[in-house]
Amino acid sequence: MAPLTPPPPGTPTPPRDGRLLLRMTRPAFLTVTAVACLLGLSTAAVCTGGLKVPRALATLLLALVAHAGANVLNDYFDARNGADAANDQGLFPFTGGSRLIQNGAVSVADTGRWAAFLLLALIPLGLWLAVLCGPGLLAIGAAGLFLAWAYSAPPLALMSRCLGEAAVALAWWLVVLGADYTQRGHFSVITAATAVSLALLLANILLINGFPDAEPDARVGKRTLVVRLGPIPAAGFYLGLALLAHSWLATSVWLLITPRAAMWGLVSLPLSLAAAGLLWRHAAAPQRLRPAIALTIAAASLHGLAMAAGLATMAWP
């Protein structure tokens, strides 16, 4: 893992304002991680007939801190590579980072230290949970930390190599898998299959966010999926992911892998199709994509919550 650049002499100490530290994590986007945890906990509850509440709360905290650390780390590296500074077309708060560095609220060094603190804080909590739940959780945690670093940091910088969407899908698939594992202590094929549709819809959030950022990303050498494909093909790819997510859910239920109650997740399909329609219409005018981005986030959140609610009806009749 590439070390964060040490701050030069005289650099201000990290911000002590708790509200500012929270804003640096982009808390509004942490809700999708809470949804992924709920889905994983629900699949475990269906199979085990109950929920170990202390483990569930610790799992949620661990996942939220991991996501927060990844967000701050992304701001740090996007400040260093110039992407956020070059981005004068982003649709805040959806794209372009937190803008706190660019607005002078915090320094790049402060951001790097806060990211390092959050990610290092995961280690003791993760080890404690692994002792309670089993060593497989260490593999999930190590993979998650690797993706949090590799998404933004050179030399991999997956977000700049047309692999950001794949990294996001894999990371949140692991969140669902990990939440389930902390309850049952082993891996589950049911959970692995159930998590796929949510992971694909979460990848679409990153994909559509790349449309307003495409021009500044291209200027600094970030070859995102939208930059690589162009707006119209990328809009088609978005529709393909949305359809694949919902068809995967229906197929896994038909194959008797995912419980039938998870079909509640199909309620998100109209939102995904509405977002895809708006994206197709305004792909070349990204400043008009705010409603489509909001619908994309709503679709993924509703998808996960609906599946979790459906599964909960099985666990607690």
Image (cartoon, rainbow, N blue to C red):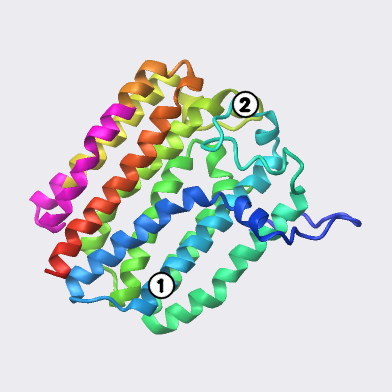
Q: Residue furthest bottom?
A: 131
Q: Which residue is labeled 1 in the image?
A: 57
Query: Residue 158 placed where, x, y %?
Result: 53, 43
Image location of residue 121, percent across then percent down = 59, 70
Type of residue at label 1?
Leu
Q: In the image, residue 216 lies at what x, y percent?
A: 62, 26
Is residue 68 toward the left or the right of residue 16 in the image?
A: left
Where are the magenta residues, as a range? 250-275
**Quadrant of res 34:** bottom left
Residue closest to the eye, 194 or 114: 114
Q: Is any part of residue 102 visible from this angle?
A: yes
Q: CA distance from mark 1 to mark 2?
A: 39 Å
Q: Please tell me whether mark 2 sits on a helix, a strand or a loop.
A: helix
| Count of numbered marks | 2
Q: Residue at x 45, y 38 (%)?
A: 206
What's the residue at 27%, 59% (across, down)?
192
Q: Is the residue 51 above or below the residue 289 in the image?
A: below
Q: Is residue 91 left or right of residue 77?
A: left
Closer to us: 181 or 157? 181
Q: Disc 2 marks which amino acid? A: Pro
Disc nearer the start of the sequence (1/2): 1
| Label 1 packing within 10 angstroms: few (<14), some (14-19), many (20+) | few
- Looking at the image, residue 144 lies above or below residue 128: above
On the picture, is 86 further left or further right than 270?
right
Residue 155 is a magenta residue: no
Q: Which residue is labeled 2 in the image? A: 216
State which mark lies toward you, 1 or 2.
1
Decide: few, some or many residues near mark 2? Use Cα within 10 Å; few <14, some 14-19, many ≥20: many
